[in-house]
Image: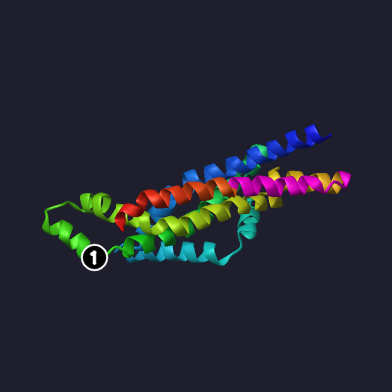
Amino acid sequence: MLWNVSLTLLKGLSTTTQIFFLTLLFALPLGLVIAFGSMSRLKPLRWLCNVIVWIIRGTPLMLQLIAFFYIPGILGHNLWGGGDTGRMTATVAAFSINYACYFSVIYRGGIEGVPIGQREAGQVLGMTKSQIFFQVTLLQMIKRIVPPMSNEIITLVKDTSLARIIAVYELTFTGYSYMKSSGLVWPLFYTGVFYLLFVGILTILFNYLERRLSYFR
């Protein structure tokens, strides 16, 4: 019994891990695109990005998951396909857009936090805009955004449990299913241990990254 439950929980952990890494894969670059859009000199683009961020940050992720998965079907478009693959795709899409909007605000804060005098100094030295961004702005931005980004990424680990709202068989859903069907409570404690280990590993990695970036002091 213990072995079977452990295997099932590991499958749920695998799904949770996939949601986590796929979300980061898409949300990190998309957040940078949205950040640049929100700082654009083109007012329509800046307005559009700010409205998207406002909507996403102002509504619950659970509601966004429901909307992403069910509304296309209600409108007669089978956007995500059927089965577990379709549910997983909808989950990753909703998570990626949600976290990209949060990341964009952090990116923007990091970019705007770099003193303008340093960019002007780069221009005086004859550097191009791309050179100034990658060699001056980006390096200092990374240092500034690591603490808030680490907080959001750790939150993402726990938010993956919301995927159960559209019946994605992730870690929490797996543990809860045993309590509902067999009256077993201990699998839920196992899920807590998995989350703690996952978050602990991320915490160690981010602490190491912050130490590596301490040369800016």
In front here: 28 or 121? Answer: 121
| Residue in view at x 65 percent, y 43 percent | 87
In front here: 189 or 118? Answer: 189
- Magenta range is 182-198
Where residue 200 appears, as percent x and y from the top left, is 57, 48
Quadrant showing the C terminus = bottom left
Quadrant showing the N terminus = top right
| Magenta-colored segment: predominant secondary structure | helix
Q: Is residue 152 visible?
A: yes
Q: Is residue 167 visible?
A: no
Mark 1 lies on residue: 116
Where residue 191 appears, as percent x and y from the top left, is 71, 46
Residue 84 left/right relative to 213: right
Q: Residues within 10 Å of mark 1 (few under 14, many from 20)?
A: few
Where residue 195 appears, as percent x and y from the top left, is 64, 48
| Residue in view at x 64 percent, y 58 percent | 62
| Residue in view at x 21 percent, y 60 percent | 119
Q: Quick check: is 186 in the magenta stretch?
A: yes
Give residue 49's quadrant in the image.
Answer: bottom left
Residue 136 left/right relative to 155: left
Give residue 89's quadrant in the image.
Answer: top right
Give residue 146's quadrant in the image.
Answer: bottom left
In front here: 33 or 76? Answer: 33
Secondary element at image label 1: helix
User: At label 1, which amino acid type do we have?
Assistant: Ile
Q: Count the marks.
A: 1
Is 50 located above or below residue 18 in the figure?
A: below
